[in-house]
Image: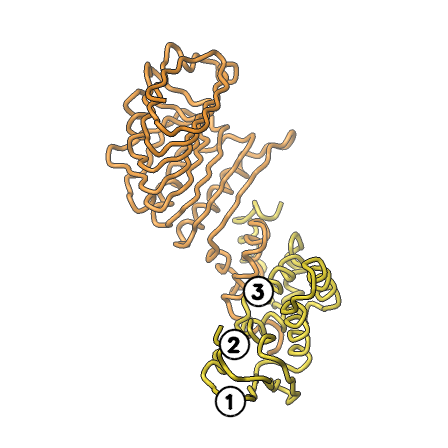
Amino acid sequence: MQGLHSVHMQILIYILSFLPTKDVVRSSILSVKWRYLWTHLSVFDFLIPRVKYGKNQNSANCLLDLVGRLLDKSNCIERLCVKIFGISVNANQVSSLISSIAKNKVQHLHFNLGDVTTTTNCVLPLSFLAFESLNTLYLGLRLTLHIPSVICFPSLKRLVLAYVIFENENSIQRLLSRCHVLEELGWCNCHFKNVKQINVAISTLRTLNIHFDSSFLDCDLFDNCIVKIDVADLLTLRCRTNPAIEFAMVKI
Amino acid sequence: MAAEKSSIKIITLIAADGSVFEVEPNIVKEMKTVQSYIDELDQNTVSIPLPNVFGNDLAMIIEYCKKHASEEETKEAKEEFDFEFVKRMKSDDKLRLLQAASYLNMESFLQFMAKAIAAEIENQSVEFVRDYFQIESDFTPEEEAELRKENEWAFK
């Protein structure tokens, strides 16, 4: 009953669960016993905010390394959020992080690294396990996304893509066709290259948000592109685009 | 549920230091450890030894349970009570009560104490937290420096 020596590890982890991720990671240097305690938590929120001065490339790499080590160590992450603003990050690092999420049954995944300027390809890993549990996916990456043909998101309800680059119609269509229970879909400044028509035909879809601003990206995002919406029960359609895009509603 | 079916009118709790507390069944509803004892019995009175909880702590826990089990108290009054309850405690008290809550298997009281402790160490230095939990660092200075570097993001 003296001090904290007899406090069960499980209770310490429970206390940590009420703290912000920064405090949680800091607990790793309290003592040897505490070193990996924090990796047993299931919710993490990593953020590097936009700063006016003193941008530090190294700090972004360092954070992604930290997240990588966490993913190697843990198998109980349910919710992972990584947001880095104002610093470009290494695309390979991001790609390898997405792969190592595979062994965690993540339900909520939020990657906002919209400042990645490289055009390296990023392939969503083939692992099924990784995405079986996924309920919410936010990808804010200025990367070309390749969608392997065997990918599947059986539980995905909410999908938001920002700054993502699709090489052709096939890749976007393949992604949409693998989300069988999707309820909310959002595109924010995605770059659809050589895409003439996108068919949105997911029967469970209730909300579709499209936001494009060509002045943000110096290219014609939606040149002559038609978005064909074939969703009987769509409740909300929000669209803010510049330039205007053409919609074709089917069965609404 | 089971407590209502049972015929027990008064429960005697005996703390580690021998102090005795007599309480009504609805007060111990949240103490699952105690509840599992009385569910088995069919008699009017029962006394339960709690060798892992000191009298002072048990008194506080019972005070908390009484307040929260009361149907006359408003939600605001209970919140006010919680606020004052935590305010008068030292960090040692909180840690002991947390352990007691865990032993007694009291879900909401455990959460209440864990949140109170978390609020105190949030945004504090490593040294503060070590002091709070009475932790002796067993890292070498080199190991600690290395860990600080690896986890640099958390130290800014």
Structural crowding at the residue carrying mark 1, measured as other residues with C-alpha within 10 Å and reported as few (<14), some (14–19) or many (≥20): few
State the residue at coordinates (68%, 60%): B128
State the residue at coordinates (54%, 75%): B103
Q: Which mark lies nearer to you, 2 or 3?
A: 2
What kind of residue is marked 3? Ser
Q: Nearer the viewer, residue A163 or B50?
A: B50
Report the chain holding disc 3. Answer: B
**Which numbered marker is on residue B108?**
3
- From the top left corner, tell me how far across and down residue A37 is, in percent: 50, 60
| Residue to which mark 1 is pinned | B43
Structural crowding at the residue carrying mark 2, measured as other residues with C-alpha within 10 Å and reported as few (<14), some (14–19) or many (≥20): few
Q: Nearer the viewer, residue A24 or B81?
A: B81
Q: Quadrant of residue A231 in the image?
A: top left
| Residue to which mark 2 is pinned | B4
Which comes before the other along the chain, label 1 or label 2?
2
State the residue lying farthest toward the top.
A224
Mark 1 and mark 2 on one chain: yes
Mark 2–mark 3 Cα distance, whole angstroms, equals: 21 Å
A31 sits to left or right of B67: left
Report the chain holding disc 1. Answer: B
Q: Is residue A195 above or below residue A173?
A: above
A42 sits to left or right of B11: left
Mark 3–mark 1 Cα distance, whole angstroms, equals: 28 Å
Q: Nearer the viewer, residue A184 or B121?
A: A184
Q: Quadrant of residue B138 in the image?
A: bottom right
User: Chain A appears in which tint?
Assistant: orange
Report the chain holding disc 2. Answer: B
Label 1 SS: loop
State the residue lying farthest toward the left.
A150
- From the top left corner, tell me how far across and down residue B75 is, in percent: 67, 59
Which comes before the other along the chain, label 2 or label 3?
2
